[in-house]
Image (cartoon, rainbow, N blue to C red):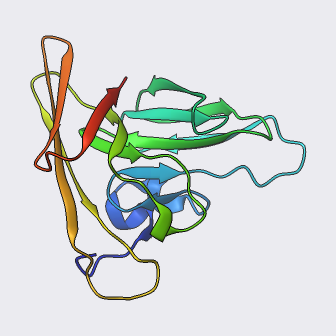
Amino acid sequence: VGDDMMFKPLSFVYRGDEFAEAVEDQLMVGDSIMIAPVYEPNAIGRYVYLPEDMLAVLFESEDNFSCTEYKKGHHFIKIAANQVVVFIRQNKLLPLCCSAKCTAEQDYSKLRIIGYIRENEKACYTLYDDDGISVNVSPVISEITAEKKNGTVLAESNNADLEINYIN
C-alpha cells in the first residue's frame, strides 16, 4: 500500500547505522515491525541487532504470547522451535485478529492491538481490507489510534463497528 515495499532490509530504514547496514537476516515488515527468524537447526534462540528500543512479542499461539521491552543494541533472544518473535517499533501498533482459513472469512470486528507507545505520545495504524487477490488499493476498514497518558493507553477506532482491545 502506498507504493512502499512490504519487506525491507534494516539498512533501508536505518540509513547510516553501520550495524543495520551489515545485518542480512532481519527484515522490516511494513513500517511497524521487524522480524528476525531462527533458521539454524536445533537453535535455542538467536542474536539480534535492534537499531532502536523495541518491544519483542513472543508468540506460542494466537492467544498465548508475552511482551518484553529491549533497548537498542545487540541481544540474544531465546526462541523455542514452537515460538515466533516479532519486534514492534516505538509508537507503532500491531493489530491481531482471530485466525481464518482465508481472507474472505476474516472477522475484523474484534481486534486486539499490541503497541509500543511512549508516555504522552500517539501511535496510528490504518487497517485495510485485502481480498488476497487484487493489486488495487483496498478500502480502509479503520484508522486506529492509541495514546499513552499517565501510564494508561487509550485505543480507539473511527469505525464504530470495530471493537478494540489494547494489550500491553
Q: Using the image, determine if residue 4 lies above or below residue 89.
A: below
The residue lying at 43 percent from left, 68 percent from top is 8
Q: In this view, does 128 lie to the left or right of 150?
A: right
Q: Report the residue at 44% width, 59% height from top.
A: 28
- Residue 24 image position (x, y, % from top left): 59, 63
| Picture layout, residue 14 above or below residue 160 | below
- Residue at the spot 77% in from the left edge and 55% down from the top edge: 39
Q: Where is residue 59 in the image (x, y as percent from the top left)?
A: 61, 36
Q: Where is residue 163 in the image (x, y as percent from the top left)?
A: 27, 38
Which residue in the rendered view is the most extreme toward the top?
A: 150
19 or 9: nearer the viewer: 9
Residue 4, quarter of picture:
bottom left
Quarter placement of the N terminus: bottom left
Residue 15 in view of the camera: no
**Split into 4 quadrants, where in the image is the C terminus?**
top left
Given residues 1 and 79, the one toward you in this image is 1
Q: Residue furthest right?
A: 42
Can residue 164 be spotted in the picture?
yes
